[in-house]
Amino acid sequence: MAFFKIIRPLNCFFVAACVAFAAFLNNSPQLSPVIFAMLSAAIIAAAGYVINDFFDIKIDMINRPNRILPARKMPPHVAYLYAVILFLLGIFLSLLTQKIGCIVLAFINSFVLFFYAKNFKKTILVGNLLVSYTAASAFLYGGICAENISNAIVIAIYAFIYTFLRELVKDGEDIEGDRLAQAHTLAIKLGRNNTAGFTLIPIILIIALHFIFYLNNFFGLITFSLLHILVSIPLIIFFIILQKKPEKKNFALMSKFNKFDMVLILIILWFGI
């Protein structure tokens, strides 16, 4: 059970779904490359979660003590070996897509996830940007394997900025444990108050994207309106809440909302592009 839980199966399923989403968005691709791409992306993501937990044991003892490694349900050296095997399996599956772009992306993402966890996770902004890239790359992966890259780029840009917003919010939520682990995050550098203010930048960029893609005819007025009603307005409300009360519980609440809202964006775009 520990081997299953540590890979965050729901998150891995979501990664596979993102690959499929980008592949099938207004497109009818060959099925076999998409299936191999979905499996490859999900397994590389699983490896990333495991290696992240390996390098994060000290922080997780404070922030998330019930996770597999701090709860001593798996020896750290076993987790490390498990991650390496998963990375290699994910790269092997990328070869079966027979798409050079997918193979290159699988190698890049494996190295990014490993060195993110080892060196860059708690480095000001660098770690946040790397996570944002890996989230966006799932859509690029699907677009490349299905030759649907133009649609995939639209979704990938949304995913990058939205993930960056969620990363800032998570840093604000985890500030106590990160400080004890001597991490260097934006939230530690600026404090919760200023981090709450900094979230306005990605929020403005997300709202700007709605206008840019609408004016360039990627989607119509109904989609444009839904994105503002169901995405822009709630984000502004959460921003106001964080500005008034930049507390851990409010950062945690916004982090949960961000996950839900990204799914909502995908649903809107699926029917709107």
Image (spheres, helix red, strand yellow):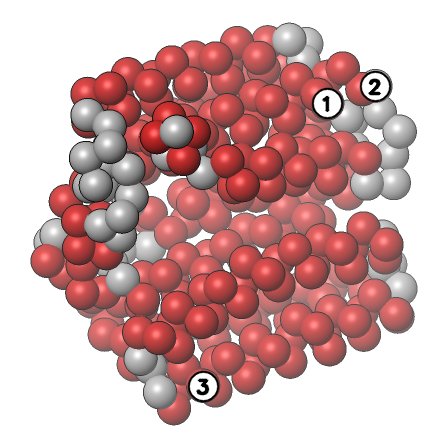
Secondary-structure class at tag 1: helix
Say which residue label 1 marks. 34
Residue 122 spot, x, y in % from top left: 24, 49
* Circles 1 and 2: CB atoms closer than 8 Å: yes
Q: Is residue 240 left or right of residue 174?
A: right
Among numbered discs 3 and 2, the one appearing first in the sequence: 2
Answer above or below: position of 153 versus 190.
above
Which residue is at a point 87% across and 40% down the rendered structure image?
26
Mark 3 closeness class: few <14, some 14–19, many ≥20 residues within 10 Å = some
Mark 2 closeness class: few <14, some 14–19, many ≥20 residues within 10 Å = few
Say which residue label 2 marks. 30
User: Disc 3 and disc 2: Cα gap in Å?
Assistant: 46 Å
* Circles 1 and 3: CB atoms closer than 8 Å: no
Q: Of the residues shown, which amino acid type is indicated by label 1?
A: Val
Q: Is residue 136 left or right of residue 64?
A: right
Secondary-structure class at tag 2: loop
Secondary-structure class at tag 3: helix
